[in-house]
Amino acid sequence: MFIFDSAKKIKREFIPQVDGKVSLYVCGPTVYDDAHLGHAKSALVFDLLCRVLSANGYEVTYARNITDIDDKIIKKALEQNKTIKEITDFYTDAYHKEMALLGIKRPNIEPKATESLDAMYALIQKLLDNKHAYKTANGDVYFDTSSDNEYLTLSKRVQDDSDKLQRVESSSHKKNAADFALWKSVDDDSVTFDSPFGKGRPGWHLECSAMIEKHLSKPDAKFAVDIHGGGADLLFPHHENEAAQTRCATNHALAAYWMHNGFVNIDGEKMSKSLGNSFFLKDALKIYEGEVLRFYLLSTHYRSNFNFNEEDLATAKKRLDKVYRVKKRLFGLTHENEKTLFQNELLGTLSDDLNISASLALIDEMITRANETLDTAGKHKELKRETLSNLSYIEKLLGFGEKNPYEYFQFGVDEETKTKIATLIQMRDEAKSAKDFAASDAIRDEILAYNVNLMDTPQGSFWEKI
């Protein structure tokens, strides 16, 4: 398996520290608002990575944090006259539900900042003891970037004078312009924590390093984790600062491999709330089935910036529809998960730095061949079973094609209408059983009036939206 390492800027063969086992840490959401498409893209990329690692035989331990201490959270709580916990619980629950609709599996470990304060205190104390941090007169604790001769080696960033000047003006208490807060002293009525360093709140960069040490790092390991991931916007300063903290507080580097997914753009512009073009995931899920969004957001290579527009989304849906139409042709048949050449090729493309374009091209070819086979082979059960096995492998590896094919094509029909149609189908079945074919035909016409197609199969009657 090969991974593009964001730190070394090359594609490298993936070799874990412990044979057969992988530790992965990904920066998760700050839960003060609804998840947007950028959150979805990152979560999808690393969900896919976990699936591919598992398919290659690795035992994966995946951790993704929840940031529930942040100035934005406090501001939202004050605006809505709610407690911090009410805000963070609400948005954490919404995040989980929306990720589930995209078929994203929950990580093995999901630590919260509020549950990791002791680990943060311990890390700060190590940095103070090692002379890599200092406390200011007003009670803040800063990381001393000048003490780390490897600082900026991750992002390869060069700070110019104007950047340094801005940083100096932001705080007159720092020794160096690039120093960043480990602990922010706060002495007012807002949310604070009693720490060994005084009342205040932790710096944002601190929590990930502390959580990794607490949950994933092993004694005497060269790296705290095998893979550290997140959005490209986190490379600097967040990941740079994380790496510095861990390096200077422990006897190991933070990660053996770094992976960063590209930005999500809306009609060509970088998604930004300041530009007013943030596309919340909950809005997209009202219009499109979650699996369609999954397919679409995964259709561009993870390192590329993703230009979200509804025309391409509609095109992606048509591409996914073809998978479901083949599945519908085979609906009700059973199969064994036998290994096929297609499956080996599919895993091979994804093992090459998640090469999704090559993977989807293979799937397109398989679907075309499957339709041709089904058209010519009639009831050739062996060929049908092979196709079913391939579809099942796609579900497992890529996370789409998992639904009942008829229900997939019902998306967008309201629940009241679905209930009415289900009742009519039951009435029609009863009329057919009673050999009242006139009533059966009349009920069929009533069902079709909902602008749906009705299909009678050996497994029962099903319908889909036209």
Image: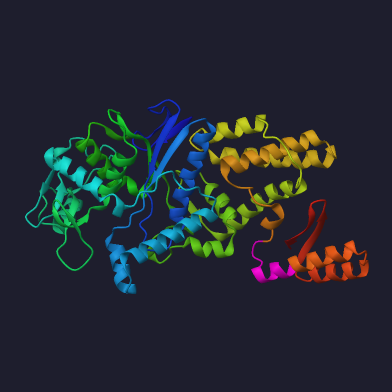
- Locate the C terminus and report the quarter of the image it occupies: bottom right
In screen coordinates, is 404 left or right of 449? left
Give the x, y percent position of residue 143: 17, 46
Q: Please indicate, yes or no, whether residue 274 appears anywhere in the rendered image.
A: no
Instruction: Say which residue appears at 84% left-offset and 70% top-offset.
Output: 443
Instruction: Tell me the quarter of the picture where residue 147 sits.
Output: top left
Colour setting: rainbow
Taking depth in this image into account, of 453 and 332 the one nearest to the observer is 332
Taking depth in this image into account, of 93 and 11 the one nearest to the observer is 93
Instruction: Say which residue appears at 76% left-offset and 45% top-offset.
Output: 330
Tell me if residue 264 comes above or below residue 58 in the rendering.
below
Give the x, y percent position of residue 250: 22, 35
Tell me if residue 229 comes above or below residue 403 in the rendering.
above
In screen coordinates, is 243 left or right of 171? right
Instruction: Say which residue appears at 56% left-offset and 65% top-offset.
Output: 286
Give the x, y percent position of residue 425: 79, 65
In screen coordinates, is 225 left or right of 344? left
In screen coordinates, is 140 left or right of 253? left
Give the x, y percent position of residue 429: 84, 63
Instruction: Say which residue appears at 34% left-offset and 73% top-offset.
Output: 80
Q: How many marks?
A: 0
Main secondary-structure element of the magenta-colored stretch: helix
Most distant residue in the left direction: 137
Instruction: Tell me the quarter of the picture where residue 251 sits.
Output: top left
Residue 290 among those drawn in magenta = no
Taking depth in this image into account, of 310 and 189 the one nearest to the observer is 189
Tell me if residue 121 comes above or below residue 55 in the rendering.
below
Q: Please indicate, yes or no, whether residue 252 appears anywhere in the rendered image.
A: yes
Instruction: Tell me the quarter of the picture where residue 122 sits.
Output: top left
Give the magenta part as a residue range. Answer: 411-421
